[in-house]
Image (tube, grey):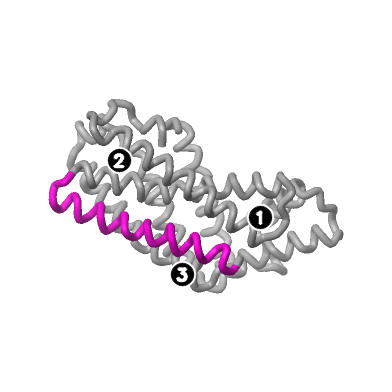
Amino acid sequence: MSGLRIIVLCAIAVLGAVARTVEVASRSSVSRPSVGDQLRLKGLTALTGARPNSKGYREAERQVGAVTERFNTYPGTTLLHVLPGILVLTLGPFQFVASLRARFPALHRWTGRLLLMAAIPVGMSGLFFGVLVPYAGLSEALPSAIFGGIFLVAIAEAFRAIRRRDIRRHREWVLRLFALAMGVGTIRLVGVGLVALGEVEVPRIVGGSFWIGWLATLGTAELWIRATRRRPQPSQSLPNTM
């Protein structure tokens, strides 16, 4: 995946996080939908062809409102998830810019520490929402537990590796961590694609988008890691095949 596509996926995830922050701060609800919820509803009903006041439209309205209500029920946990998440997705791409690492090594180290620290509440709160209070039941809880667990392992292994000055292993685990964070953008695109293909069952949309989105980004990161493990890091700013 090109650097531009990586930036686009990060931007999608960041915009979603910003919108969720605004909604939590304004305490939007089913009776008082936010601008973001109104846009989600318009997009969902446009893809499904549901007309206003139809059964499909009312069901889409209920689902959009219910998802927002879940986050509004736990505002503190939501902010612990989205605000550090914005930081991870913003700092992440710069960690792979070889010229910045070479020219400003101290900045690279400090932003790396900040990224790992920010990733901890992102992972923990993500497990809370995905495993303890999943909207789509087991179809959401299972991939959340698996990939959320890998995310936390990646944080710990990246920290352990850099403490041992094992740059290669540190780089590989940070790539896995960032791939999972960036996977949120892929998940959103896959979800839109599933709805466009006619899928209307929420558990299947959530489960399918979670599995496909995270497997795609993490799998691509693994391919990139294996392809570059035995040769010097490329000079380009971002991996070409993540």
Q: Residue at x 21, y 41 (%)?
A: 168
Please tell me which of labels 3 and 2 falls first in the chain: 2
Tell whether label 2 touches label 3 (CB within 8 Å): no
Q: Residue at x 19, y 51 (%)?
A: 161
Quickly name the residue at label 2: 95
Q: Residue at x 49, y 60 (%)?
A: 143
Residue 162, compared with residue 5, is above or below; it is below
The three-letter code of the residue at mark 3 reads Phe
In space, the residues marked 3 and 2 are separated at their CA atoms by: 28 Å
Quickly name the residue at label 1: 35
Where does the image place residue 63, in percent across and percent down from the top left?
Answer: 69, 63
In front of the other: 220 or 234: 220
Q: Is residue 162 magenta?
A: yes
Quickly name the residue at label 3: 128
Q: Which residues are magenta?
A: 137-166
Secondary structure state at the residue bearing disc 2? helix
Residue 27, compared with residue 197, is above or below; it is below
Where does the image place residue 25, in percent across and percent down from the top left?
Answer: 54, 64
Tell whether label 1 touches label 3 (CB within 8 Å): no
Query: Which quadrant holds the C terminus?
Result: top left
**Does residue 16 appear to the left or right of 232 in the view shown?**
right
Density class for disc 3 (Cα within 10 Å; few <14, some 14-19, many ≥20) is some
Please tell me which of labels 3 and 1 falls first in the chain: 1
Residue at the extreme left of the image, as rendered: 164
The three-letter code of the residue at mark 2 reads Gln
